[in-house]
């Protein structure tokens, strides 16, 4: 059980061992959010799945995970973080085995939904446990470990996944989770005490329904919007109406939290603390600007520069390693000088790194010119993840740690999804504009009968973020020329569009840095402040 005898020392024995065990499960769930991306072609062949079915295998995890974070965070406050973490790791491990055993796309989709549930159950408990275990003077270092995992896993996913798919087959990207999950569960049972401030067992069921339904509508719309061209899904139902319904349900959820007399799912008093309110807004804007970085760079390396998925992953690996190292040091620095200063510096460095990449990128530049900007971004990311968590959770009453971590996680997930949608739309728009002009410049090198087809094919290929396919029936000479000019057109057009996206993302990150000045330098809210604010 918790040791609350001193506010200056950790609440459990061997706190770093406990954090390491919890972060193992967190790392596994985060890795699985990206590792499947690399196996899309293999899944299409191995299961006979359509492209849309495979996309749903990827998106179902994210949809369930994002929609349930507020609920699972609050349930952790009520029933205990250790208990919820164990249920989550058990569900995730069992689902991983079912994913590996799936013989149809439907079976794999169902197992991925269960994986998303497991991930949603365990994720908030890690943040809540940090807030509960570590005193304020040590939280920067603890969140530094958390930030290192958060920064490393998304990059390692494609690299690790590519290696497994190449050598063991797609099923092993899921089977590998089973022994790790079992070992983590055993370690939790042996070394992790129950982490919960005693509370009555009450659940705001109306709040659960409203929050889950509202978030599901918004998340579904943001994930599926591009696939439906932001228009009609079926009959009168369209992406705008689904998102609008989600917003209305969330508004009803907030109203219910204000008037209900039981234990609210999301205590509104959380937002009475300036750092929590401002920190969530910064997290939303940060994810909005940050999410497009890896997306556009991976497309550039693979589609424009010709790197394989595994090679592209290795190009980005130093960035991930620096993020992990930087998070550890940034956490220590945040404990010494305050997370606000470190966070501002990290945001500005991120923006600078994007500007450097935009300036150095070229249609045939390869990876080396991108390295200086990637190194800056790696260090800056490390200086951002940990302090952002620290300043957001700073001053939150530990009794509401689960609710706070669920809200913060949901805010960033929605910001990231909105950022992905915006990046995709801006990139596609800029790319289509650039491709037509670049194709027309090169079309004169082709036989007259191929010129119009080349231009239209190049523009159409932009919608799929790929060079135009070579038409069948051409002579070897014309086919080779068509392919070369198509690749040149796409590479030049994509770099031009990518530069616009990177500079726009840099501007968004500068805005996020400016919001940091609204944070209080050392917002240590007295214990119980949230409860008083909520009661009022």
Image (tube, grey):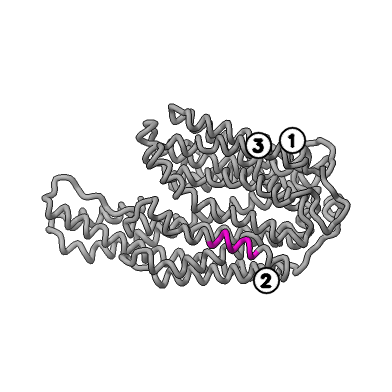
Q: Residue at x 52, y 51 (%)?
A: 154
Q: Is residue 106 left or right of residue 343?
A: left
Boundaries of the magenta span? 322-330
Q: Distance between the Cα atoms at labels 2 and 3?
A: 37 Å
Q: What's the distance in space between the residues labelled 3 and 1, CA to CA?
A: 29 Å
Q: Position of residue 278 (x, y in %)?
A: 70, 62
First of labels 1, 2 by sequence position: 1
Q: Quadrant of residue 489?
A: bottom left
Q: Residues within 10 Å of mark 2 (few under 14, many from 20)?
A: some
**Label for residue 185?**
3
Residue highlighted by disc 1: 205
| Image quarter in which the N terminus is found | top right
Under circle 3, the secondary element is helix
- Per the image, the residue denoted by label 2 is 341
Q: Give the residue at x 55% y 54%.
A: 416
Dominant secondary-structure state across the stretch colored magenta: helix
Cα gap from disc 1 to disc 2, whole angstroms: 40 Å
């Amino acid at each position: 059980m918790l040791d609350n005898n001193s506010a200056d020392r950790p609440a459990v024995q061997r706190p770093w061992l406990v954090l390491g065990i919890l972060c193992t499960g967190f790392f596994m769930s985060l890795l699985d959010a990206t590792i499947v991306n690399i196996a899309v072609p293999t899944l299409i062949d191995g299961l006979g799945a359509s492209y849309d079915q495979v996309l749903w295998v990827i998106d179902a995890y994210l949809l369930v995970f994002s929609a349930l974070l507020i609920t699972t965070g609050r349930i952790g406050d009520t029933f205990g973080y250790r208990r919820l973490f164990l249920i989550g790791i058990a569900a995730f491990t069992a689902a991983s085995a079912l994913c590996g055993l799936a013989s149809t796309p439907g079976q794999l989709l169902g197992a991925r939904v269960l994986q998303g549930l497991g991930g949603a159950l365990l994720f908030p408990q890690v943040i809540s446990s940090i807030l509960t275990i570590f005193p304020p003077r040590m939280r920067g270092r603890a969140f530094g470990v958390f930030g290192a995992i958060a920064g490393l896993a998304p990059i390692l996913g494609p690299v690790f996944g590519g290696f497994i798919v190449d050598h063991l087959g797609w099923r092993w990207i899921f089977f590998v989770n089973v022994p790790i999950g079992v070992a983590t569960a055993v370690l939790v049972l042996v070394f992790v005490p129950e982490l919960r401030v005693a509370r009555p067992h009450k659940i705001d069921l109306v709040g659960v329904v409203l929050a889950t339904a509202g978030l599901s509508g918004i998340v579904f719309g943001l994930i599926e919007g591009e696939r439906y061209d932001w228009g009609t899904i079926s009959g009168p139902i369209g992406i705008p109406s689904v998102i609008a319904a989600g917003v209305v349900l969330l508004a009803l959820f907030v109203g219910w939290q204000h008037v209900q007399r039981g234990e609210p799912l999301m205590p509104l008093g959380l937002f009475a603390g300036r750092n929590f309110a401002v920190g969530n807004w910064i997290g939303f804007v940060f994810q909005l600007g940050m999410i497009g970085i890896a997306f556009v760079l991976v497309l550039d390396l693979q589609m424009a520069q010709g790197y394989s998925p595994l090679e592209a992953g290795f190009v980005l690996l130093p960035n991930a390693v620096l993020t992990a190292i930087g998070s550890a040091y940034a956490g220590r620095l945040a404990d010494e000088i305050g997370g606000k200063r470190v966070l501002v510096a990290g945001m500005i460095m991120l923006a600078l790194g994007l500007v450097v990449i935009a300036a150095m990128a070229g249609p045939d530049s390869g990876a080396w010119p991108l390295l200086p900007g990637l190194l800056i971004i790696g260090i800056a990311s490390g200086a951002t993840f940990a302090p952002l968590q620290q300043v957001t959770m700073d001053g939150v009453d530990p009794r509401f740690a689960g609710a706070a971590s669920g809200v913060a996680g949901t805010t960033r997930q929605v910001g990231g999804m909105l950022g992905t949608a915006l990046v995709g739309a801006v990139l596609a728009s800029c790319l289509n504009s650039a491709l037509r002009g670049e194709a027309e410049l090169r079309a004169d090198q082709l036989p007259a009968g191929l010129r119009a087809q080349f231009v239209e094919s190049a523009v159409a290929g932009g919608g799929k973020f790929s060079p135009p396919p070579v038409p069948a029936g051409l002579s070897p000479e014309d086919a080779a020329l068509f392919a070369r000019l198509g690749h040149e057109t796409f590479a030049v057009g994509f770099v031009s569009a990518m530069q616009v996206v990177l500079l726009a993302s840099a501007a968004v990150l500068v805005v996020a840095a400016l919001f940091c000045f609204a944070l209080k330098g050392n917002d240590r809210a007295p214990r119980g402040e949230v409860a008083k604010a909520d009661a009022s």
